[in-house]
Image (spheres, grey):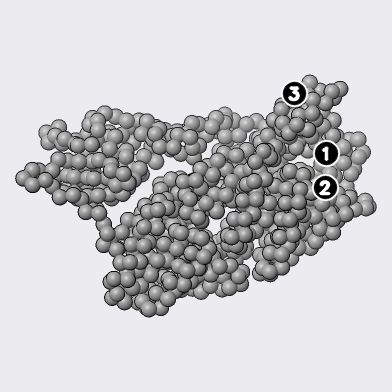
Amino acid sequence: MSEDPARDAVARGDWQKAYDLLVEADARSPLSAPDLALLADMAYAAGHLDVTIAAWERAYAQSMAAGDRLAAAGAAVKVAMHLLFDTALMAPVRGWARRCEQLLEGVDDTPVHAWLAVVRNYERMLSGDFEGARLWARRAIDTGTKHAPAAAAIGRVAEARSLILEGDVAQGLGLLDEAGTAAVSGELDPLFTGVVYCEVVCALQALAQYDQADEWTAAMERWRQGQPVGSIHGRCRVHRAEILRLRGSWAEAEKEALAACEELRPYLRREFGWPLTELGRIRLRRGDVQGAEAVFLAAQEAGWDPQPGLALVHLAQGDVAQAAASIRDALGRPGNVPSKEAPPNTELRRAPLLEAQVEIEIAAGNLDSARAAAEELSRIGERFESKALAAGATHARGRIRLAEGDGAGARLDFAAAAQLWNEVGAPYETALARMGLGDAYSAEGRKAPAQLEYRAAASAFEHIGAELVASRATRAGGDAQPAPPPAAGRDQRNTFRREGDFWSIVFENRTARLRDLKGLRYLARLLADPGKEFHVVDLVSGERPESPLFPGASDAGELLDPKAKQAYRRRLDEIEEDLEEARTMGDSERAAQADAEREFLVHELARAVGLGGRDRLAGSVSERARASVTKAVREAMARIREHNAPLGEHLDRAIRTGTYCAYLPDSRVPVDWHL
């Protein structure tokens, strides 16, 4: 390039402008290897992961053609790093790392050696080989200290995570502090500062060390302002959403999770299920069972394990048998999707599954299974020295004792769990424990202290917006809001009116007060216009139109653009090579991993290409909205039927759902509604 406006834009921090200029220059005349390296970095910052990887692949090819083996090795390790961090496809990662190793044979230590050690470390960690991962992490630290400080910092985080996952918590936490200090000091460039922050928070939150995770998340939030560096923004948002969920700030947590999904969409492939499952957890706690189910299923479609979220959705829907089967399958056949956010084959990954299993198996009446899950959960809590894990295990033990009829023992456990959760700063879990404490007092026949605990729990649930459990706690405490009595000497009008967080519903002189549900809002619109047909997209348009994960969102065009499909096919070729090598070496676990990755990519390509090679479009708005509205309306009608059977029967006859929804009462028996 005769002039350097792109590098001037980089110097100003105008990453998007630099990217645009480099793309224009490349279109006029193919860039040289050094400029391709700059294009790769700017593409990553601007959200074009496929351009990033393609640019490094081109730089590799050019360097090989020029006979510059070290430059080619440097490009190869960058391809491997981006595939590792943002696609979690291990077979292609191994292929590019192997190319790098071959090019470095006979070469003394360089920065490329340090980065290769980082890649090899994570490849081993994400494959469940923590001992092998630690050896590579130590090599990254030793070589990086001399040649690449960023690689050394990431190596320290990686070594810490491997130590923690093997149960050496104290030493691991010490190394995390060292790595975090390197990020705070400003000695690293923006991209790897973000990676270090992200990895520190990942490790702490996986360990349920929420206080420290909260501190590092706050530091990461301050840092990321004005730092547009690839997927780091989106990952920061997911971690922020996790903390907000724990603290009970659910509306804010959902906004962060939705923003994370949008920011991470261009980067992550299977790991896109990570922000989706976090969004599902938030929605489930808010009582949005339908919305939670939608995103858990989307995560599953992306190749991610949505458990225990999906099992808990089944439980919330009243399908206890399906919930029990689902959680048993999740524990018996754990997902092996490589993820640096949640490495596979670890006890820490089993902990939330076990906690959910206790609740589900008790509901199913399988106390032996629940007891075994609670005992394993207790062992995990003790091993990893986490107050939150200990709180979850104590709460689980209280559930078991209550189900066994040991009210006194359950009371002690629930009281201890409430104290622990309160110290962690988790209001939802604290309120759940207090509700359990109320149940324990009730089992002992002590009505007065039971009501105090129920009322305290209901108040806490209402404060954070946990509508479904708040209603249960209110009913248990005897604080259900009675409907106002009818005026003397006058029949009540048929009423379907929202009053704050409740709906006043009157039909045939029977009254009910129900907490707000999305389906009740849809029903109110239908009742307001008898005979009028509403398209489902019109019904949902006022709910969350800004959310791409809500049924009213617009279509996303082609599932995969031509360049993405080409990249997928290149990855398939690399997976085939890795699969053949694994089989030759007799490495069954590696072969199984490569085979799963091949299946995932083939599935993605099949979804994107229809008969005759025509591109398929992203999911139909109408179909997604139809399923969403139908489910919400049916759930609301079921709730109404519980409290006002005549109205439930009337709505069963008069409400029609489908692509077009309508209220079609019998014209021979007109019904006037006060809305």
> Taking 652 as reference, is 400 above or below it?
below
Residue 601 in percent (x, y) is at: 63, 43
- Say if 472 sits above or below 634 in the image: below
Q: Which residue in the structure is indicated by mark 1?
A: 60
Q: Which residue is mark 2?
A: 99
On residue 284, which mark appears? none
Residue closer to the observer: 321 or 190: 190
Tell me the element at label 3.
helix
Tell how many labels. 3
Q: Which mark is residue 24?
A: 3
Give the secondary structure at mark 1: helix
Seen at 85% across and 30% down, the residue is 32
Lower position in the chain sequence, tag 1 or tag 3: 3
Q: Quadrant of the C terminus?
A: top left
In the rendered structure, the answer to whether residue 573 lies left or right of residue 506 reads right
Q: State the residue at coordinates (40%, 58%).
A: 460
Q: Secondary structure at mark 2?
A: helix
Q: Answer with the quarter of the image where residue 36 lies.
A: top right
Question: Where is residue 171, by image quadrant?
Answer: bottom right
Q: Going by the image, does 486 lie left or right of 50?
A: left
Q: Is residue 127 left or right of residue 300?
A: right
> Image point 86% across, 41% down: which residue?
72
The residue furthest top is 28
Mark 2, other Cα within 10 Å: few <14 / some 14–19 / many ≥20: some
User: Is any atom of residue 373 visible in this view?
Assistant: no
Q: Quadrant of residue 508?
A: top left
Q: In 3D space, how far apart are the residues under numbered discs 1 and 2 (Cα atoms)?
A: 10 Å
Q: Viewer-nearest of labels 3 and 2?
A: 3
Q: Earlier in the sequence, mark 3 or mark 2?
A: 3
Q: Do the residues under discs 3 and 2 have CB atoms within 8 angstroms?
A: no
Q: Are marks 1 and 2 in contact (CB under 8 Å)?
A: yes
